[in-house]
Image (cartoon, rainbow, N blue to C red):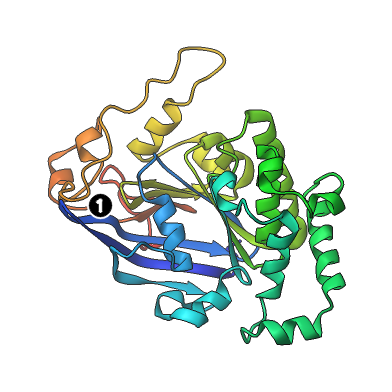
């Protein structure tokens, strides 16, 4: 059953002004996240996953230009919000867990100071003094301690007085999760969660976040190049290549059978305990300043045809719940995402 949309990205196109010229990085993507749904956005490094997340929060660099599209959150277009309006959305309604916990946390403040700062500044009217008056400091502190306990940090009371440099990578990652969930946002963006950690700690943190999402009833967009992570945590998967969505499917359906040649190559490249090492995909992501004129995967595709150089394949529904942008498959219904 299709869940009620919480976030809808429609025809989002983002260019970057560089010394080499205009880089056409995000090329008209569509993405939908339902309420209470976990979605994974997967693809190679450099394909535009993190740029998409930053566009949602309005954190694009100065040389970025949103050429077209909309990002609707609860029916409100985030691209039309400016300054204080957008800051009220960040953290309180949409939170982000950044990729590297060692750089995302401020080294000169304690864990408790950083958690408390989030609560102090979350007043809808932007008034710190009014918020402090309404909520005693002891109540704010207890809320922070409870959140640290929720993400399974041992002895959360003493953790409040420690600095990030005193923590292990796994503990810092848990603190980032606590920061993101502190204001009970409706949507969490998790960018390459646990990439810098060893496999056992990464698996533990992903499982804990998955459990928290289920109990808190929030939605999550997981940004990852790790297909194992996508399979573990998501309900649906969007496969991105060179700034375009090339396949959308329910997670179990995608791992059972891949339609797009790029999705097939990604799965074939995964190392297995039994058999040969994954072969990978020949070539590399195209230059965004002068990308292929039609299908961006065409130079690397083993099934390329003349039409692939002439017409960009639209994202079409090829079977129930499955959309693919490839000329190999005719549409079975209306175009959608």
Q: Along the horizontal axis of the image, is 326 left or right of 223?
A: left
Q: Is residue 208 above or below residue 138?
A: above
Q: Farthest top residue?
A: 275
Instruction: Please give the name of the residue rendered at 18% of the width and 48% of the height, measured from the top-left corner.
Output: 291
* Residue 25 visible in the shown view: yes
Task: Specify the quadrant that holds the N terminus.
Answer: bottom right
The spot of residue 278 in percent (x, y) is 43, 20
**What residue is rendered at 38% in x and 60% in y?**
333
Find residue 146 and report its image quarter. bottom right
Point 31% across, 45% down: residue: 329
Which x, y percent locates residue 8?
Answer: 47, 68
Q: Is residue 21 above or below residue 259?
A: below
Residue ranking furthest to the front: 108
- Name above or below for residue 107 compared with residue 138: above
Whether residue 183 is visible here, answered yes or no, is no
Q: Position of residue 240 (x, y in %)?
A: 38, 47
Q: Residues within 10 Å of mark 1 (few under 14, many from 20)?
A: some
Which residue does the image show at 32% across and 28% down from the upper left? 281
Residue 207 in percent (x, y) is at: 71, 42
Number of disc labels = 1
Locate residue 262: give its quadrant: top left
Quarter occupied by the C terminus: bottom left
Q: Is residue 9 left or right of residue 28?
A: right
247 left or right of 15 in image: right
Of 307 and 151, which appears nearest the observer? Answer: 151
Residue pointed to by mark 1: 313
Q: Secondary structure beneath disc 1? A: loop
């Amino acid at each position: 059953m299709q869940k009620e949309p919480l976030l809808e990205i429609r025809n989002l196109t983002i260019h970057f002004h560089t010394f080499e010229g205009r880089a056409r990085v995000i090329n008209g993507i569509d993405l939908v996240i339902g309420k209470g749904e976990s979605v994974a956005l997967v693809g190679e490094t450099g394909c535009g996953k993190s740029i998409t997340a930053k566009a949602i929060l309005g954190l694009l660099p100065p040389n970025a230009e949103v050429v077209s599209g909309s990002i609707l959150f609860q029916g409100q277009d985030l691209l039309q919000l400016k300054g204080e309006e957008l800051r009220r959305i960040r953290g309180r309604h949409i939170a982000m867990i950044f990729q590297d916990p060692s750089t995302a946390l401020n080294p000169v403040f304690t864990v408790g100071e950083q958690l408390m700062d989030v609560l102090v500044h979350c007043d809808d009217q932007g008034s710190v003094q009014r918020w402090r008056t309404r909520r005693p400091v002891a109540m704010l502190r207890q809320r922070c301690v409870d959140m640290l306990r929720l993400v399974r940090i041992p002895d959360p009371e003493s953790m409040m007085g420690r600095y990030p440099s005193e923590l292990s990578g796994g503990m810092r990652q848990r603190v980032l999760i606590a920061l993101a969930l502190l204001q009970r946002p409706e949507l969490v963006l998790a960018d390459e969660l646990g990439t810098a950690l060893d496999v056992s700690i990464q698996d533990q943190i992903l499982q804990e976040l998955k459990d928290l999402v289920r109990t808190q009833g929030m939605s999550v967009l997981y940004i990852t190049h790790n297909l194992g992570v996508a399979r573990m945590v998501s309900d649906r998967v969007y496969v991105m290549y060179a700034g375009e969505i090339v396949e959308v499917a329910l997670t179990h359906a995608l791992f059972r059978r891949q339609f797009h040649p790029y999705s097939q190559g990604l799965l074939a490249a995964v190392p297995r305990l039994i058999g040969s090492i994954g072969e990978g995909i020949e070539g590399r992501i195209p230059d965004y300043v002068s990308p292929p004129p039609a299908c961006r995967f065409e130079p690397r595709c083993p099934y390329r045809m003349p039409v692939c150089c002439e017409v960009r394949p639209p994202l079409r529904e090829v079977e129930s719940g499955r959309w693919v942008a490839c000329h190999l498959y005719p549409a079975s219904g209306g175009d959608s995402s």
